[in-house]
Structure formats: structure tokens, C-alpha cells
Amino acid sequence: MELKKTLLMPRTSFEMRGNLNVKEPIFLSRWNEEYLYEEMLKNRQGAPQYALHDGPPYANGNIHCGHMLNRLLKDFIVRYKNMSGFNTPFVFGWDTHGLPIENQVTKQGVNRKTTPIVEFRQKCREYALKQVAIQKEQIERLGVVGDIENPYLTLDKKYEARQIEVFAEMALQGLIFKGLKPVYWSPSSESALAEAEIEYYDVTSPSIYVSFNVTDGKGVLDKSDKLVIWTTTPWTLPANLAISVHPRFEYGLYETSKGRLVLLKEFKNRLQEELELGEMKLLKSLQGQELDGVKVKHPFYDRESLVLTGEHVTNEAGTGLVHTAPGHGVDDYNVCQKYGIAPYCPVDDRGFMSGEAGERLEGLFYEKANSVVLNMLKENNALLMEGESLHSYPHDWRTKKPLIFRATPQWFCSIEPIRKNLLAEVKKVHWVPSWGETRMINMIKDRNDWCISRQRAWGVPIPIIYCEDNTPIIDKEVFDHIIKLFAEHGSDIWYGKEAKELLPVGYKNSRSPNGLFSKEKDIMDVWFDSGSSFNGVMRERGLKFPADLYIEGNDQYRGWFNSSLTISTAVFKKSPFLNCVTHGFVVDENWDKMSKSKGNGIDPTKVANQFGADILRLWAATIDYKQDVRISEGIIMQVAEGYRKVRNTFKFLLGNLANGEDQPFSIKADKVDTFEVVDNFILAELERVKNDAINYFEKYDFSNGISRIVTFMSSDLSSFYLDITKDVLYCNSKTSLRRLQVQNVIYQSIDILMRLLTPFLPFTMDEIYHSLPNLEKTNVQLLDYPKVSSVFPDSVIKDYRAFMELRNIVLKKLEEARSAGLIGSSQEANVLLSKKNDFLKQLGLDKNITELARLFVVSNVGFGSYETVLVTRAEGQKCPRCWNYVERLHEHEEHAVCERCLNVLKENK
Ligand SMILES: [Zn+2]
């Protein structure tokens, strides 16, 4: 008989090659057939709920790497919490209203202006549902679990009704109002935009200084004096109604080569040069307060502008006197409100100057109006200096065209009355990373009233009906009726019925003596749609509210976190989430944004189909997602390499549970209770790794937890333990206690590592699970997560580290002996250790020479009066079965083997 055939070499059905692209789809169908998600909930019936509420991605286009990262992080948490003993309902959501969908439908040849609105909305709905179906399939491929059959869509009737419910409550509280107010307006989209829809780019604008002649100096200035302002938007001068000064700044009236000018004293030197004012003589010093009420002539219209005082005036740029157009700026609007000056805005929806701006400007696009305004200033001798300035300017995030501030009638949600509560709620939330709290607080501190109306078609209509005198009806009975209609018919009913038909039967209002009513045409900001999801989903479906966790990209401080927090605090006086985690953006390997035009995009669906979703999952689990994270083909290859190592370690572990062709190791039949020192070392280290990893995962820190696990697998487990136990595993008899001990350690390692990694690599771990004997559950996901141990054997770890130090010295000496040609393989060596080694005595290893020799993978260990470690060439003969050197070989049939091997061969017979 060949000796090689008497060895117990590893064997397992678990394949070396992942072939994830082929296997994962098979696993997915099996999970579907097993109703995995439903089974997960059943498994935790009656357990405390852990509610992660899904922030709805926008239903347009294929999923990109940002979606993929977000979906995977959520899935890690859902799977982890479920295995840890929580009931984890997870409802996928989609944001399905809004302009990008309208634009896509228009691109397909549907004319928004000529198509009846109900029909146009139907096209939008069809488009949105198609997009949801595409994205559903793509995210399922990633192996994410949740209620994919019943997702929430913001276009659902019930969802819309729940949205109107919170709107009505806010309106009844007096938080919703209609006003003429400057808002970010996109001429290219012909709509108001939310702050979250704005991007800033640098642009070059005209930079001009303009003088205004005093008409009424209130006793502090003369009629020949001039006030100087600076602006980079000459086209807003037609809307100038005032000049603002700071009440406590010090201004000066100067005699200059360009007349008697008023400007901020501290700017004198800069302006003298910039405006070429020649010799300047201070005629008078004035506190800003003293200028309050002074009147000046508009530089090219026959009307006056008023001097106001306001705290918004800064001493950072310009002249310290601020051009004030309440129709074109929020600060301007606010200061003018105090003086009773109404906003005025001679610019239309598309950004063209209206007739109010006068003949010369009427019909000009606002940017073109700049040069005409400059000419008018020159003709009136009011232009002191013109130049150019490069500055950051707001743009429409979709059309990439510049925005303007423009006063229009809009619906608002007042922030001021709830600001204090909002700030208090922010402080109650646990933010990860912790700077999220400051970011959110700053966002809320500076936040203006929220403009919630949009002049578009595809969205939830603002459910306001007006009386004959245009008074909006804010009445619980009316709102309740509309909520019922929406729940039953969806918001399309708003467009299919007359205003009167939307009111309760027999509704009367003294402001409509003739029984005539009209309805609001604007729709709601999509951030109001998604921001009310805690009501449309968590409360509607009876899930935990507030939710345990919201986790999204860090652009959502401005977006979804903000709108959700605002609505929930307004209506329920509390934050809709207890924890808020954010992740960075996914960029390419040079930290550049991914874009189609650059061709640096990575398509996650393609990667999943080519390399496997578990590769993407391993990537997502090992990056520091709190910052921007990189992905590229090269990075994916590196991750795949790391994956192969993990897989190979598991393959080796699984293989050694086999006992040749016999019954494999069974944890029930083959369990042992006594272990050798080194087994205890590894079991203690495994315990510690498990504890550390769980502590990291509890803090949503996946990368440190996974790194702890993977490092343990490749170093302590693979390079050390599996290396030194090979001799026992391959050469000992299958009934030997030592081999069973090692198999027990291996089984426990597989069991714990597999459970730890299941939330992250569910495909691979399920494959491993199905390679084990005696399964109790259909899916590895239904097992319990390991728990942190309350008592931990610190002393064992200390001994372990001390032993490893000794082992390192031995390995170094062996390496030296090898270089010197004394030995080839380490089995050709004997190691002699110092007699004085109390540490080995303490561990009892001085008595167990066989075990000690195994720990160094040498043939023999002796003790003597050596200071450190001595390596000699092993004497005796090499056993042809195990390659160890022994004094004497024993004859057995045609072979001569060592005593251990002899016994194994005899037993095998
Ligand atoms: Zn042998």
C-alpha cells in the first residue's frame, strides 16, 4: 500500500474557485424559494424591533456605486441585527415624483404644455414604475434582503394621503403660509429650487460701483452728496428699493475727484485706489444709525430709494453700503419687511425682464440686461467704476445653469417657530460620524423658511382650496376630506375634479358667497414627499417610530435628514430617528467624481455579474465609508484577491473536518472537553477577535471589525495554528485525541467566523454552511450571531503572546541554520531550549516534548544549560510517512515508519 494513501488529506465539497457569477444567482433563487426575508422575521417574532428606515433613492436610471454602497451598508445592518436577535422589518423605498422624471418623459416626445395634465402624470407614473422595476432587479442582485415585494413608493395613494396628513397638521398649526418671497429660482427649469438642488460654481460677473444722489439728507447729508454701492448683479438694479447700512459701523463723507461720496471709513484706502478717487478729504464722520431714513434717487428711474439699517451688512467687501432689492435677495427681503417695503421683481419665470423694468430692458434675458443697465448708469453719470469679479455662484444641479433670486408667490413652511425644538431634537440624536451633529445644527441655525411649492405637474398637489376672495381654506374638515379622497383615488383626483367637488358635500364658506372655489396649482417639493416617509411608512405600517436608524450619504444633512426632521418635529415634536449615520461619496481611484463623460464609472451590476456581489460586499465592508471612498477595476481586483484568501482558509478548515472517506467530524459525536495549550491559545484569540469585531459592528464600524477577523484568519489561524497542526491532522489516526482536539478547534473557528461574516458575505457563508454536516436551519442567515463573552481569559492571551515571542526566536534560529546549510526543512532540526525556561514549565510544555516539537514543526526538542536557543541537525532516520526524524524506524509490511505512524497503520488495518 502506498503510504501517501494512508494520510488523512483535506477533502471538502467547498470549491476553491468562488465562481460567484454563476453560483450567486442560484443562491438568490433558493433564498426566494425559502422566503428568506419572511423566515428572518418569523425567526425573531416577538423579539424587540430594530427599525432601519430606508431613505428612498430617486427612481431614475441604473443604480450606481453610490446606491450600491448605501444598499450594502443597510443590508449589513439589517442582517447583523436580525442574527443578533432583533426583529428587523426593512421596507425598500423609492422617490418617484419630481422634475427629472418629467424631463425624461418630455425627452420621450411628450409635450408637457399641450398634453392634458392627468395624461402627462400617467406617463410620468409609468416611467417611474419602470425605473423602480429596473432598480429592484439590480439591487436584488447584490443579495440585499428586505420587503422587496411591498416597497414604498411616494406615488402610492396611501403614501400621498399620509403626506397630506402631516401637511394639514402643519397648516392647522399655522406653520404653512403663502407669501411673495425671493427664492432660488431656476430660469432654465422655470421653477423654484430647494437648497438641496443647488450646486455652486465659479463664474465671472461684472463688478461695478454705483453712486446714488441724495434727495433728502435728513439734516446729516446735503443734496450734492452721493452714496456708493457695489454689486455683481447689475440686472437687479431695476429692482433696487433701498440701500442698507450697518447701524454701528462708522461711515465717512469724503470730498473726492468724483464728488462728495459716502463710504465705510475702514475701506477708504482700498476704495481710493480702486475707484481712482484722487486726493480724499474727510468732511464728516457718521454712524450708520444716523443715515437711517435718508432718501436717494434711483440712478436711472424717477423714484427714490430709502436708506435702511440692518445687521446683515458686513465689512468684508464692497463699500459698506449695500444695494437692496427685496425681490432678489433674502437678506434684502428680511430688512425691507421691517420697513414695510414689499418685494418687487421685474423678472419673469424664464428669467426675462418684464415691462415694469421699462422699455429699454423689457424682453431681455437677465444676463443680457447687464450691459443695458451699465449704459443707463453711464448716461446718468452714476457708474463710478466697472470691472470683473470671479466668485462662487449658485446653479441648478440638473441643468447646470445659473440661478437667480426671484420673488414669486410660494408656499412656505415657517422654520422660526420650530427652530428651538429642531435644535433640541438634533442634540438627542446619536450622530455617526460625530461631526454630523454640528453640521446639522449649523444647517438649522441658518435655515430660512422652507419653500415647499413647485410650479410643476408630477408631484403631490398642495391641497389648498381658495375662496372667492382668494383666501386659502385652512380647515380640518376640508383637509380630512381631501386626505380620504387621496387615500382612495390618489392625488390624480385633484386634477380630475373641480375645486368644489374636492370639498365635503354641502361645504359652505362666508368668503365664497356665490359658492365659487378654486384650487392651488402648485405641487409640493419632493423633499416634502420623502421627508414625510416616517408617516407614510413607519407609522402607516405600524413599525417603530422614531426609527432606530437613518443611514444615507452625507449630502442628506441638507436633504432627507433635514426635511424628515423638520416635518416630524413640527407634527410629532420629535426626531423621526434615534441614530443617524452618513457615508461619503464613491469616487474613482484618483479621487475624481465618476462621470459618463470621463468614462471612469464602475457599473456595480456589471461587477456583480462578472466577479460576484460578495466581492462588492467585501469592498463595502472593508472601506472607511465615513469618508469619500474609492473604487476602480484595480481596487476590485485587490478585493477579489483578499476574498480568495478568506475562501481558501475556509476551504482548508472545512477540508480537515473530513476523515478520509469516512464519516466527517461531528460536533455532537466528536466533541472533546480537554485541549492542549496551543488550542486554548487559539480559542482565546478567536474569542477576543469575536468580541472586538462585535464591539466595532455595534458602532457601525464595519471595516475595523472585518479587518480584525480577516487578519486573525490569515495570521494566527492560518500561518500559525493550521501550519503546526498539519502533522496531527494528516498523520495521526482519525480516532486520536489530539486530532479530535484540533478538529474541535477548527469546527469552532468555522462556526464563529462564518456567523461573524454572514451579514457581509452572505453568499459565501451560506455556501460554507451547506458544506457542513448536520444543518439545523435552511440558511446561515437564520443562525444566531455570536455574543460578546462576559468573562474573558486575559491570562491565556498573555501566555500566548509570550510563547509567540519564544517561537519567533526559534524560527529565526531555524532560518539561520537553513541558510548555513545545516538543515533543509524544519523537520530536519532539533531545537534545544534553556533549562531555565520557567514559562514553558508553567504551561506544562516542558513535559510534553511531542507537542512542543509540533509547535516549532521540528523533529525533537531538548533542554540544556543554554542561554537562548540552539538548533542542531536532527539525528536518526526520516520516517517516510510523516517526514519526522526519529531514533529508530519500525518495520511494518513493506515499510519502515516511526512509532506513531506504525500505530496508525496498525489501527487502519
Ligand atoms: Zn511518522
Image: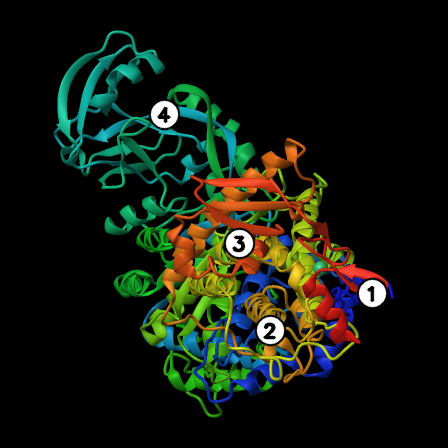
Left or right of 895, for residue 623: left
Beta carbon of the mark 3 residue lies under 8 A of ligand 1? no
- Give the foreground label among 3 and 1: 1
Q: Residues within 10 Å of mark 1 (few under 14, many from 20)?
A: few
Where residue 871 appears, x then y in whole percent?
56, 40
User: Residue 277 at x, y = what percent?
Assistant: 30, 12
Label 2 is placed on what type of residue? Leu
Nearer-N-terminus badge (3/4): 4
The quarter of the image holding the C terminus is: bottom right
Point out the tag, 2 or 1, that comes first from the N-terminus: 1
Q: Nearer the viewer, residue 398 or 349?
A: 398
Helix or strand or loop: what does disc 2 sit on? helix
As measured in the structure, the alpha-carbon distance from the residue carrying label 3 to the one carrying label 2 is 33 Å
Asked if the residue at tag 1 contacts the one at tag 3, i.e. Cβ–Cβ closer than 8 Å, the answer is no
Is 696 drawn above or below residue 520 in the view shown?
above
Residue type marked 3:
Ser
Q: Which residue is mark 4?
A: 210
Q: In the rendered image, which residue does mark 1 sit on?
A: 5
Most foreground residue, 545 or 498: 545
Foreground mark, 3 or 4?
3
Q: Position of residue 890 (x, y in %)?
A: 74, 62
Give the spatial CA distance, label 3 vs label 4.
Answer: 63 Å
Q: Toward which corner of the image does residue 795 lie, by quadrant?
A: bottom left
Type of amino acid at the residue the image marks with label 1: Lys
According to the picture, the residue beneath numbered tag 3 turns out to be 707
Q: CA distance from mark 3 to mark 1?
A: 38 Å
Q: Which residue is mark 2?
A: 737
